[in-house]
Amino acid sequence: MKTGIFLAAVVTLAINTLTAQEIDNTASYKNINADRYLQLNLNNDVLNQTDQQYTEGASLELVAPWIKDFPLSKLLIRPFAIKRYGLGIEQGCYTPNLKDGDEKSYDRPFASTLFLKNFVITVDTIDKQRFSSTISTGIIGPDALGGQLQDEFHTAINDYVSPGWKYQIQNDVILNYGVNYEKQIVAYKHLFSIDAEAAARVGTLSDKISPALNIMFGYFESPFSNERMPNKFKIYVYDHPQADIVAYDATLQGGAFTKSPYTMPADTVSRGVFMNRSGIVLAYRGVYFEYFHCFLTPQFSGGTQHSWDGVQLAILLK
């Protein structure tokens, strides 16, 4: 399939469907040129001395060839020759500015998500393209356990425990489908790479399209090849500016099928949001470590900009 035709198809899909979850490990700056690995990702805004908006998240993901036989893998779009299948579980926790009072004093709803991710990453090494697709299935609401975990953690460290979790988004189904397309613009050996990205998400958790750039500088395995350098030390920095055009966000507006005690009116949700993620990655002998920082502009009227930090550890499996 020619690059231009394929890109046009992706853009058409994005426009006709119209959010990435906060943890997305399919992009080129997260590249691991291996068919088997395990990775753990932890996010929190504690270093910014805040406890609001997207306040914490975690995911555990496994990539292995046998996952291609997982039932949902049959529904994934996989156009290119190199294919890496994965399964993961992810939890996210969202809170307003924590303070005393009833729900009318909060600037956004409390929300918690827990879902399974089934994904595939495909690579075209000739035309330097990547395409990934993800199916997310799970729950938003009290049964996602975000409120319980936050309350227990705050109690353990003798910190403020908010009464507001009783107003959180109620239990509802998460069923989302996402696609990401990336095309290399310029690269120099293993030292420098820039690629353009177009992403789309549709479902009961979020609906949006997201153009972005990925910039990598250092010494790394090319995300647009299958070449591996297992015994060499890799280190690189990256920057990922992304614009989101948002149609729907269940963590703000509530689930698709149930009524919640407190949600944001649709006309208060920001339809244009900017996020920037930057990080540093070190890798040697099958172990990858990353530290990153994310910045996000306000997601609703009267909201504030927000940032959080995270770490990721990945280990190659035999």
Image (cartoon, helix red, strand yellow):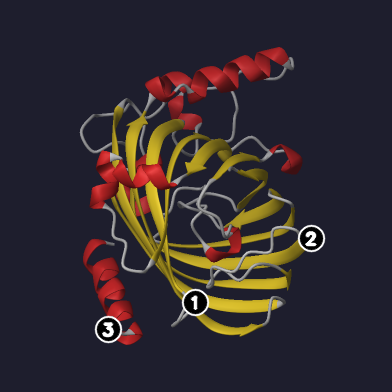
Number of the label disc, if any, that sits on residue 233: 2
Q: Given the image, on which type of amino acid does mark 3 rest?
A: Ile
127 to 40, vertically: above or below: below
Q: Given the image, on which type of amino acid does mark 1 rest?
A: Ala
Residue 129 visible in this rendered orientation of the protein: yes
Q: Distance between the residues labelled 1 and 2?
A: 27 Å
Residue where numbered disc 3 is placed: 5
Residue 85 spot, x, y in % from top left: 41, 50
Q: Element type at marker 2?
A: loop
Q: In this view, does 156 lie to the left or right of 28?
A: right
Q: In this view, does 8 lie to the left or right of 184?
A: left
Number of the label disc, if any, that sits on residue 261: none
Residue 209 visible in this rendered orientation of the protein: no
Residue 243 spot, x, y in % from top left: 48, 67
Q: Given the image, on which type of amino acid does mark 2 rest?
A: Phe
Q: Which of marks 1 and 3 is in front?
A: 3
Contact between marks 1 and 3 (CB within 8 A): the answer is no
Residue appearing at x 50%, y 39% in the figure: 107
Q: How far apart are marks 1 and 3 (CA)?
A: 16 Å
Residue where numbered disc 1 is placed: 196
Q: How crowded is mark 2: few (under 14 residues within 10 Å), some or many (20 or more)?
A: few
239 to 283, vertically: above or below: below
276 or 186, which is in the foreground? 186
Q: How far apart are marks 3 and 2 (CA)?
A: 38 Å
